[in-house]
Image (cartoon, rainbow, N blue to C red):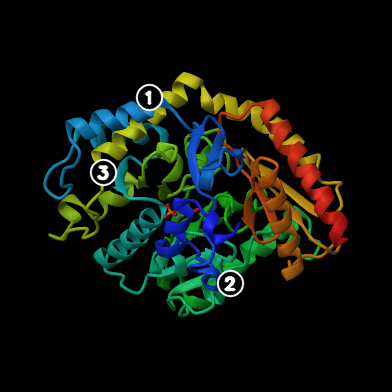
Amino acid sequence: MAPTQLTKTAQQARQHLMVPAQDMKTLGQRALPALSHGEGIHVFTENGHRLIDGPAGMWCTQVGYGCSEIAEAIADQATTLSYNSPWYTTNTQAAALAEQIATMTPGDLNRIFFTTGGSTAVDTALRFVEYFNNALGRPSKKGIVVRRDGYHGSTALTFSCSGRSQTAPHFDPPAQRIHYLSSPNIRLSGGQTEAQFLETLVEEFETLIEANGPETIGAFLAEPILASGGVIIPPKGYHARFKEICEKHEILYISDEVVTAFGRCGEWFASEKVFGVVPDIITFAKGVTSGYVPLGGVAISDKLLARVSGENAGGAYFGNGYTYSGHPVSCAAGLANIKVFEKLDLLNHVRKISGYFNQALQGLRDLPGVVDVRVSGLVGCVECMTVDQRIIAKAEDRAMATEIDTLCFEMGLIVRPLANLCVISPPLTITEDQIDEICDILRTAIIRVTAEHL
Ligand code: PLP
């Protein structure tokens, strides 16, 4: 499109907007497609192009677009009480949502601290680990163990905990106290069975703890499924084994459920019911409001808190908080969102339809260029390579996947472009027919693009 034909939004965006993961080469020259509205699982561009929201925005638009119950709750709350300082007051919505979420979390994770999103939730959890160990008089127990291919956010600390932080060009190396384990991706296991691979990963964790000394390791931070790192599903039993090791060495297990909570895996929280682990701390965001307004949070174990509160507090404050912690409008949206889940029986719907979703995506496995299909709940990806059997993606694999995503977009489907993967994690309200439509578009795009590359 010639510059003179640009819409007003495109002109404004080109001139003044900087977006997440901005491609610096095209800053000022290119703008992303502008959306005008959404309806159910669909969004529409300014020029009327209708698209299925394949990745549910950023794994967050659980109930889909245009939900009047959530919109009305937001409007009502903004009219009634648009803000309160969480430092010296609270509000009905934050208290009610905390109570509600405490009934959904596993174990005794009954204390909820609200944040502004996922990064600030993980940051808060990590700051709590720091506070906890200082309060218990073990200041050296601050190491954080994470996995390559993990993703935990975009603050300085949470990005450091993300697997790719070590190789991010033009950023400083991450903090020394962060330790990286291998990605639990069986494709990288050199042909081991799932059980063998689990033992390899367990041994790596134990060796790391021994090498550094358990007195220096404060937390293990892990997503149940490594979502943004490539929809990596750890081997069966991984979470429970890692928790056992954490317990043995008094290392706090933080389950980062920013993607997996609120229905994506068919449960409010996936840690216990899907992955068999009761963590010490859970972080959540995204689906808690179905993306209608920003909100995140941390659920912390009562037992843990008892060790550093009340008579054990030593007169200290947990000096961590945000202007918008427990924002009444966000919490009202969260409460309304949960009501919509219940009205639509959405957890049951996900449990039922995720089998169909898996089967449909697995049906793409035999296409040329497809080397793997991974699915858990309503999180899925199709991994594409230009060379059969290749394990580590190269530039040409990423380019081919980007072309597939672009063609899908033209055909009416947003696919999250993630390296050489086509990621699909749709709104939870998706139907079987809509899954078929997604897979038909993906199939056509993969066949057409790979015909030019392979
Ligand atoms: N943790 C996980 C597992 C995520 O996937 C993300 C974002 O995708 C974050 C944390 C950061 O969340 P936010 O972008 O809301 O700060």
Label drawn at residue 207: 2
Q: CA distance from mark 2 to mark 3?
A: 40 Å
Q: Quadrant of residue 130?
A: bottom left
Q: Amino acid at mark 3?
A: Gly
Q: Secondary structure at mark 1?
A: helix
Q: Nearer the viewer, mark 2 or mark 3?
A: 3
Instruction: Work out whether mark 1 precedes mark 3 in sequence or the reverse, and give the earlier one.
Output: 1
For the N terminus, the image quarter is bottom right
Instruction: Work out whether mark 2 precedes mark 1 in sequence or the reverse, and give the earlier one.
Output: 1
| Contact? badges 1 and 3 (CB < 8 Å) | no
| Contact? badges 2 and 1 (CB < 8 Å) | no
Give the residue at the far top of this rendering: 343
Q: Amino acid at mark 1?
A: Glu
Label drawn at residue 431: none
Q: Quadrant of residue 18?
A: bottom left
Q: Which residue is mark 1?
A: 69
Q: Nearer the viewer, mark 2 or mark 1?
A: 1
Instruction: Work out whether mark 2 precedes mark 3 in sequence or the reverse, and give the earlier one.
Output: 2
Give coordinates of residue 391: x percent, y percent: 77, 65
Give coordinates of residue 82: x percent, y percent: 20, 38
> Residue shown at 22%/58% (left/top)?
318
Crowding at dot 1, Cα within 10 Å, few <14 / some 14-19 / many 20+, comes out as some
Q: Could you tell whether 310 is left or right of 252 in the image? A: left
Q: Amino acid at mark 2?
A: Thr
Crowding at dot 3, Cα within 10 Å, few <14 / some 14-19 / many 20+, comes out as many
Q: Secondary structure at mark 3?
A: loop
The answer to whether residue 277 is visible is: no
For the C terminus, the image quarter is bottom right
Q: Which residue is mark 3?
A: 326
